[in-house]
Image (cartoon, rainbow, N blue to C red):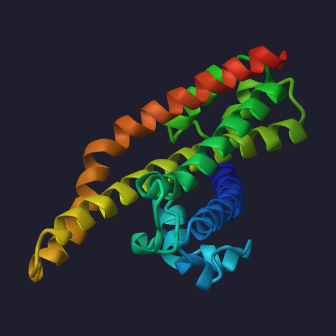
Amino acid sequence: MEVKIAEFLVKLITYLFVYIIIVTIAGSFRAWVAYRWGDDSAANVSMMDLNPLVHIQPFCIFFLIFFDVAIGHYGEINTTLIMAPYRRIKITCIYLSSLFIYSLCALVSLVALIATCGLSAAVQAFFMLGNDDIRTHLYLAHSYPQSSSIALMFSFIFVSTAYLSISLGIIDLLFDSATIIRNRILSRQRDAGMSQFYIELLIPYLLIIIFHGPLRWLMTSLMVVGSYGIARLVGLG
């Protein structure tokens, strides 16, 4: 029982530490990209700042602690402020900017994990990222008994960063897709009425139910294969 409590606390503290850092970076970068191309909505509410208090919401922390679900918080994108030329490309880049940061964080953390534990860590990471039961500090200690406690600590931070980055990236992509679909539907309806409520409520959750699992597996596979290739290329592990 004491071991499980200790493991839970290690996991919780690591998740919170990693979550605050990557959400702050991703939110700030997204606000900067939007501002760079004409939309100052997020910048006006200080979301370009690297202040975690601006980017973290209590309900996001609640879901992370009690449901092991990572959700980001970003300012609304006002697409009417994005001007030509290449307006659609700019809007797409703004929506994908946070996914880019999360993908980069996942890739870098997995390369760092391989550099710390060896090339075999890529296979271990793939299973750990997809299985909540073995995504623990204790599992890493059993898998790499020759590693020092410091190496194991950083390895778990790397795994946690990859897991949360992938989770945040997929959720972010699905919510942004829901926003685009919602705006397209509502723009064609003069008087949405109660249908607007159902559209805003149902579309995000339908997308999550249908696509979250496959997209998470796909992104995990891409990140693991990509990190393994980079590690081999630069001679790590």
150 on left or right of 9: right
Quadrant for residue 198, please give it: bottom left
* Whether residue 137 is situated above or below residue 191 in the rendered picture: above
Image-quadrant location for residue 120: top right
Which residue is depicted at the point 39% across and 38% down? 215
Q: Going by the image, does 204 lie left or right of 198? A: right
Residue 62, percent from left and from top: 51, 71
- Residue at (9, 82) in percent of width and height: 191
Residue 87 is situated, as x and y percent measured from the top left of the image, at 44, 58
Tell which of 25 and 130 is nearer to you.
25
At 54% from the left and 64% from the top, the residue drawn is 65
State whether residue 69 appears in this view: no
Q: Quadrant of the C terminus?
A: top right
- Measured as percent of width and height from the top left, residue 144 is found at 78, 25
**Considering depth in this image, is 132 or 184 the residue closer to the camera?**
184
Residue 157 in picture, x, y percent from top left: 74, 46
Whether residue 80 is visible here, answered yes or no, is yes
Give the number of marks. 0
The residue lying furthest to the front in this view is 85
Q: Nearer the viewer, residue 38 or 3?
A: 38
Residue visible at 84% across and 15% down?
A: 235
